């Protein structure tokens, strides 16, 4: 297995990209992502990575260059954050519709305005409708491994969709942890470089991105829908094989805490670690509680969500993003409630919005969430809060 190295989250991601032996990197600097591609530029300059680094004038151009390189058959990587993701938005739809296996890392950061360079999940959630497979890491080892797993999923001939891997800005991107690095030889044995997608080749001319008139557009979108469904199986087989080879397993969702809990808190990202620590502190004090970590966000793992949530007395969903005007201001909460209702279960769930703009989610905040859920546990569904509860905000 690989050596253990103290690395920041961004550097851990860069090491994984190097081990994946990518051919083309296109990127534009933006905080807190910049050090990922800076480290990759250093690897290229030092001769540790044989790749083309394309310096572009914007994030829109960065993803456009990635589309062109992937269409030509290259293994491609890019990364961005916040406003950069917003500027890429047009090309995210194009890259997924063209079925190009691009991998991109989001160093999750709040969207402006007001200008904010700190972490929440605004940018990550903003791309949830673009047709990309989406994963979010809890810690830096997971962020490193996710990049390797992402290429396995993206380049699966039954999938051929771009993949987002995400880690929380600053809390992870700039925090150093011991990382077991997947070495190049190990990575390429797991994700061999083999072109599995249609690509531009003068010897076999094809057209990409042609006009899709009403006679054809609908069929293309249905195929894309089916590919996203197949990506779930590709995720399962990829993490199973990764676990067998490297001894680390990342399920689409993961339950931690008491067996058969009365209360479950659903969350994503580094906050899950805080929830684990808090539940360890209060275990055995009369409340049977657990945390359900959602790692795979698209495609949303409905079956596993149902498996863990049906029959639970109270569910709290922590969102670190806010969608004003939506019937579910928390996007993760919306997916949870829709899943339960769709399958005929009472949605005994409460939405909690917290940690926006980089505000830390502390044990005190978690205690407030858990206490509220305990208070609501015996109440009928009609008496549960219909509006999100904002935790840690000044009123």
Image (cartoon, rainbow, N blue to C red):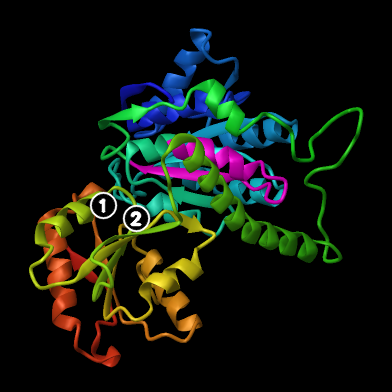
x then y, percent, for residue 384: 25, 85
Q: CA distance from mark 2 to mark 1?
A: 7 Å
Identify the residue at image location x=17%, y=59%.
Answer: 279
Q: Looking at the image, which residue sits at the far front?
A: 244
Which quadrant of the view contains residue 225? bottom right
x then y, percent, for residue 217: 78, 62
In this rendered view, identify the residue nearer to me: 46 or 234. 234
**Tag 2 near tag 1, CB within 8 Å:** yes
The answer to whether residue 29 is visible is no
In this rendered view, identify the residue nearer to me: 76 or 340. 340
Q: Is residue 387 left or right of residue 90?
A: left
Q: Which residue is mark 1?
A: 271
- Crowding near the residue tagged with mark 2, few <14, some 14–19, many ≥20 C-alpha atoms within 10 Å: many
The answer to whether residue 260 is visible is yes
Q: Is residue 373 left or right of residue 350?
A: left
Q: Where are the magenta residues, as a range?
A: 145-168
Identify the residue at image location x=39%, y=29%.
Answer: 12
Q: Which residue is mark 2?
A: 268
Q: Is residue 22 left or right of residue 323?
A: right
In this rendered view, identify the residue nearer to me: 143 or 170. 143
Q: Is residue 167 magenta?
A: yes
Reply above or below: 177 against 82. above
Q: Looking at the image, which residue sits at the far top?
A: 46
Reply above or below: 190 against 184. below
Q: Is residue 345 magenta?
A: no
Reply above or below: 97 against 290. above
């Amino acid at each position: 297995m690989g050596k253990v190295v103290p690395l920041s989250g961004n550097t851990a991601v860069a090491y994984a990209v190097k081990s994946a032996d990518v051919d083309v990197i296109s990127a534009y600097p933006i905080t807190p992502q910049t050090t990922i591609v800076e480290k990759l530029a250093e690897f290229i300059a030092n001769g540790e990575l044989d790749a083309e680094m394309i310096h572009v004038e914007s994030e829109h151009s960065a993803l456009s260059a990635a589309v062109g390189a992937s269409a030509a058959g290259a293994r491609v990587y890019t990364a961005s954050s916040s406003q950069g993701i917003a500027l890429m938005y047009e090309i995210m739809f194009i890259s997924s519709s063209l079925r190009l296996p691009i991998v991109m890392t989001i160093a999750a950061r709040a969207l402006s305005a007001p200008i904010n360079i700190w972490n929440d999940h605004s940018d990550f959630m903003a791309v949830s409708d673009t047709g990309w497979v989406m994963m979010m890491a809890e810690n830096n080892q997971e962020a490193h491994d996710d990049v390797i797993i992402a290429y396995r999923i993206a380049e699966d001939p039954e999938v051929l969709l771009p993949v987002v891997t995400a880690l929380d800005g600053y809390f992870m991107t700039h925090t150093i942890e011991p990382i077991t690095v997947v070495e190049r030889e190990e990575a390429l044995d797991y994700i061999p470089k083999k072109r599995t997608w249609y690509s531009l080749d003068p010897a076999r001319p094809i057209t990409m991105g042609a006009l899709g008139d009403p006679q054809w557009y609908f069929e293309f979108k249905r195929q894309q829908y089916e590919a996203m469904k197949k990506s779930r199986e590709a995720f399962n087989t990829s993490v199973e094989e990764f676990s067998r080879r490297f001894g680390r397993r990342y399920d689409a969702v993961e339950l931690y805490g008491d067996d058969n809990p009365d209360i479950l808190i659903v969350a994503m990202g580094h906050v899950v670690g805080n929830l684990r620590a808090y539940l360890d502190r209060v275990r055995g004090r009369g409340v049977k509680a657990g945390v359900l970590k959602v790692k795979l966000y698209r495609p949303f793992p409905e079956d596993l969500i149902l498996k863990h949530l049906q029959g639970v007395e109270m569910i709290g969903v922590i969102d670190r993003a806010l969608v004003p005007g939506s019937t579910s201001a928390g996007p993760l909460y919306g997916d949870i409630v829709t899943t339960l209702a769709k399958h005929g279960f009472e949605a005994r769930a409460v939405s909690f919005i917290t940690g926006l703009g980089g505000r830390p989610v502390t044990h005190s905040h978690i205690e407030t969430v858990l206490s509220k859920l305990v208070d609501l546990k015996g109440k009928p569904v009609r008496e549960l809060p219909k509006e999100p509860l904002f935790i840690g905000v000044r009123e």
